[in-house]
Amino acid sequence: MKYESWNIAVEGQKTGEAVLHGYLLDAISVAPEKKRPAVIVCAGGGYARRSDREAEPVILQFLSMGYHGFLLDYSVAPNRFPTSVRELALAVSMVREHAEEWHVDPEKIFVCGFSAAGHLCCSLGEFWNQEFVYGAIGKTPEAIRPSGLILCYPVITAGGAAHRGSFDCLVGEQATKEELDQVSLELHVHKDMPKTFIWHTYEDQAVPVENSLYLATALRKAGVNFELHIFPRGLHGSALANEETSGIRQELVIPAAQKWIELVHTWIEEF
């Protein structure tokens, strides 16, 4: 495996550049030209920070499946929308531009986000064809469009079931209704969004399950293919829901929810 990292700079960054970390699997002798899927992981943290438990441990799971892994350290507060969306767009375009060199299947570049980073990944899935994203970074819409979205207990709505802290960091505590509507993602679903995988837990009190339900309903109405799993128990921020990512918090070990990573594997293999 080869590890590299690259700085990602976009206009409007207030706290320095974002960083894309690449974990590139070596070619194997029996299939030296094999093109692999790639997954860009974005850890959650309410747009205020990035959680370690949703970062490298998740990358290792995707590597074990035979996929290249990338981890984006995107900008958080005091940066505001759409800075991090443009950073993720640049990350996708970078992986696609180097697809031949890195043995990546350019039609299988996925973004995987947890909690507020689920909002980030879904934002790119919705706004990839908007000039304020692709034009601002000098790319074409096709270059930045992810092949699929993997959304893990995502922040979606700025309405009644909102995780208010995420939106305070993303658009400011004094945001207008118009500004909040712009980032309330259930309002912007369209037919050209990528296929989407979503999972959540019924017991999530930090980011209520309604966030995923609102999104799934909007995807259905728009005719966008999606897969949705709601597990009956589990607190917010469970990541892989196992001992590896729970640390000292045993309440984050959730046997049923551990299956989400296997379900994603099947979803990608059938893509």
Image: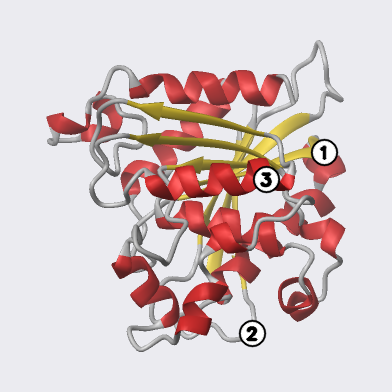
| Label 2 crowd (10 A; few <14 / some 14-19 / many >=20) | few
Give the quarter of the figure containing the C terminus: top right
Q: CA distance from mark 3 to mark 2?
A: 35 Å
Report the side of 219 relative to 231 (left or right).
right
* Residue 3, above or below 173: above
For the point 21% across and 32% down, which residue is it? 252
Q: Which disc is residue 11 wearing?
A: 2
Q: Nearer the viewer, mark 3 or mark 2?
A: 3
| Label 1 crowd (10 A; few <14 / some 14-19 / many >=20) | some
Residue 27 percent across, percent down from the top left: 75, 25
Q: Which disc is residue 221 wearing?
A: 3
Whichever of callouts 1 and 2 sits on the residue coming sooner in the sequence is 2
Residue 157 percent across, percent down from the top left: 45, 60
Q: Which residue is mark 1?
A: 107
Report whether residue 114 is seen: no
State the residue lying farthest toward the top.
30
Whichever of callouts 3 and 1 sits on the residue coming sooner in the sequence is 1
Whichever of callouts 3 and 2 sits on the residue coming sooner in the sequence is 2
Name the element at disc 3: helix
| Amino acid type, mark 2 | Glu
Name the element at disc 1: strand
For the point 52% across and 74% down, which residue is it? 181
Q: CA distance from mark 1 to mark 2?
A: 28 Å
| Amino acid type, mark 1 | Glu
